[in-house]
Image (cartoon, rainbow, N blue to C red):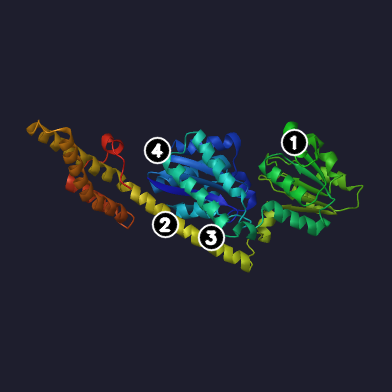
């Protein structure tokens, strides 16, 4: 079994295609199970965000896994195979591990160092666990990736070197409509991205924040957290005219903000309007760019402008430091995986030695039945210490050698020399492995 990742991201795919491949809710659950049903796929989780759709799988065969995942992505996105194939990337084994660690550290994000990806990876793992599609292999890999991401942000300045999408968007808003303190803002949606946008707006000094959402209760809770007010999603059209800044994060697949809405809102106003669309699929009709006084920034325009790829000296230093951490952690993860391969053999060897000791001691007691308890204890402890010392060096050494290329052959040699059965349940569970 090996780790495989097949995916699309803002680096390889136009936003117009990426938004067709993005999945969430019931569609995401169905995609998980559709991939998991394939005979070559033992485990699977999917990281689906506004910037990427990546399928991580523990597979029996490389080509079988790639074919299965590509076919399922094609069915769910409706993209023809030849179109999908031009934009897909595939990573296997060490490269797959390195890619996930890079994603977790924020180096593969549209805005370098953004922190939301850690929560998105954590959510992907939680969903796969709840749906029964993630097992030991993907759990260990993903947990390690989350630790690497946290380490990168603790030990480097990568999270400060790259602002979040919301931060970048609000910087562009200031260029279009001036300083944010005292401005009026409308936030459409009440999910995690909307919550981040609302909190960021409040910290920036925006005093009048209105939250619109299909479920009014959620809008109320979010608005109250920043002293704003809430309206139902049907009230968006009426609120646009009063807002200086609109941030939309619904991603429902239909336009929450249409050209007609914005055109009506701009008829009787002289001040400019800035609209930030952070949804995938898009929430805002791109046609509003034609309207006088309106500035629209969405994920596609951010991608085209290369936001997140501009590297200054401080950011370059942080990126270099994070790459060093990733390389170190990839080696550590692969070493631990290779060492784990020999664990059953080591346990089997120690279990067999313990059986031999107990059998020989039983034979000895039958020959000297009059031996007192103290004598028996001394002899028992001495024999066990001798065996433990004899086994210590080879068991420690075989685990060290297992981390080198071809290291599994040393475990094979042990099994052959001592006639071991590492698959025996008693061997694996009956003794604690020497560490």
- For label 3, count other residues whose C-alpha is less than 10 Å away and answer few (under 14), some (14-19) or many (20+): many
Q: In front: 137, or 144? A: 144
Q: In the image, residue 272 lies at what x, y percent?
A: 85, 53
Q: Which residue is tagged 4?
A: 39
Given contact means CB atoms under 8 Å apart, are the residues at marks 3 and 4 in contact? no
Q: Secondary structure at mark 1?
A: helix
* Label whose residue precedes the other's in the sequence (1 or 3): 1
* Label whose residue precedes the other's in the sequence (1 or 4): 4
Q: Which residue is tagged 2?
A: 331
Nearer mark to the viewer, of 1 and 3: 3
- For label 2, count other residues whose C-alpha is less than 10 Å away and answer few (under 14), some (14-19) or many (20+): some
In the image, taking residue 392 as reference, residue 111 lies left or right, namely right
* Label whose residue precedes the other's in the sequence (1 or 2): 1
Q: In front: 220, or 37? A: 220
* Label whose residue precedes the other's in the sequence (4 or 2): 4
In the image, taking residue 422 as reference, residue 207 lies left or right, namely right
Query: Is 179 placed above or below 426 here?
Result: below
Which quarter of the rendered picture does the N terminus lie within?
Answer: top left
Nearer mark to the viewer, of 1 and 4: 1
Q: Which residue is tagged 1?
A: 219
Quadrant hosting residue 122: top right
- For label 1, count other residues whose C-alpha is less than 10 Å away and answer few (under 14), some (14-19) or many (20+): many
């Amino acid at each position: 079994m090996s780790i495989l990742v097949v995916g699309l991201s803002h680096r390889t795919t136009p936003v117009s295609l990426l938004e067709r491949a993005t999945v969430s809710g019931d569609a995401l659950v169905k995609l998980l199970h559709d991939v998991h049903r394939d005979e070559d796929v033992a485990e699977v989780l999917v990281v689906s965000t506004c910037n990427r759709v990546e399928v991580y799988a523990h597979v029996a065969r490389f080509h079988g896994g790639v074919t299965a995942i590509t076919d399922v992505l094609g069915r769910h996105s409706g993209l023809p195979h030849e179109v999908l194939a031009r934009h897909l990337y595939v990573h296997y084994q060490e490269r797959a591990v390195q890619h996930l660690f890079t994603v977790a550290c924020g180096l593969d994000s549209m805005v370098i160092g953004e922190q939301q990806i850690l929560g998105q990876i954590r959510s992907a793992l939680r969903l796969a666990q709840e749906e029964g599609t993630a097992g030991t292999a993907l759990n260990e890999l993903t947990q390690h990736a989350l630790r690497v991401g946290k380490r990168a942000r603790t030990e480097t300045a990568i999270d400060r070197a790259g602002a979040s999408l919301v931060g970048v968007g609000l910087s562009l808003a200031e260029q279009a409509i001036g300083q944010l303190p005292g401005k009026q803002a409308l936030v459409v949606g009440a999910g995690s991205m909307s919550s981040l946008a609302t909190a960021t707006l409040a910290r920036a000094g925006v005093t009048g924040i209105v939250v619109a959402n299909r479920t009014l209760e959620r809008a109320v809770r979010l608005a109250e957290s920043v002293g704003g007010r809430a309206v139902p999603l049907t009230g968006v059209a009426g609120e646009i005219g009063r807002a200086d800044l609109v941030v939309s994060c619904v991603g429902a697949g239909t336009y929450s903000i249409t050209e007609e809405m914005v055109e009506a809102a701009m008829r009787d106003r002289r001040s400019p309007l800035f609209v930030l669309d952070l949804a995938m699929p898009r929430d805002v009709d791109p046609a509003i760019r034609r309207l006088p006084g309106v500035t629209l920034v969405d994920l596609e325009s951010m991608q085209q402008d290369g936001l997140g790829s501009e590297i200054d000296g401080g950011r370059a230093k942080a990126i270099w430091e994070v790459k060093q951490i990733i390389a170190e952690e990839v080696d550590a993860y692969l070493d631990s995986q290779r060492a784990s391969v020999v664990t059953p053999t080591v346990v089997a060897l120690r279990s067999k030695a313990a059986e031999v000791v107990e059998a020989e001691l039983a034979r000895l007691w039958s020959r000297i039945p009059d031996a007192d308890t103290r004598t028996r204890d001394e002899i028992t402890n001495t024999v066990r210490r001798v065996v433990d010392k004899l086994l210590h060096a080879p068991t420690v050494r075989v685990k060290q050698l297992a981390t080198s290329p071809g290291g599994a052959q040393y475990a094979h040699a042990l099994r052959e020399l001592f006639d071991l059965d590492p698959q025996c349940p008693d061997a694996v569970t009956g003794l604690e492995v020497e560490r």
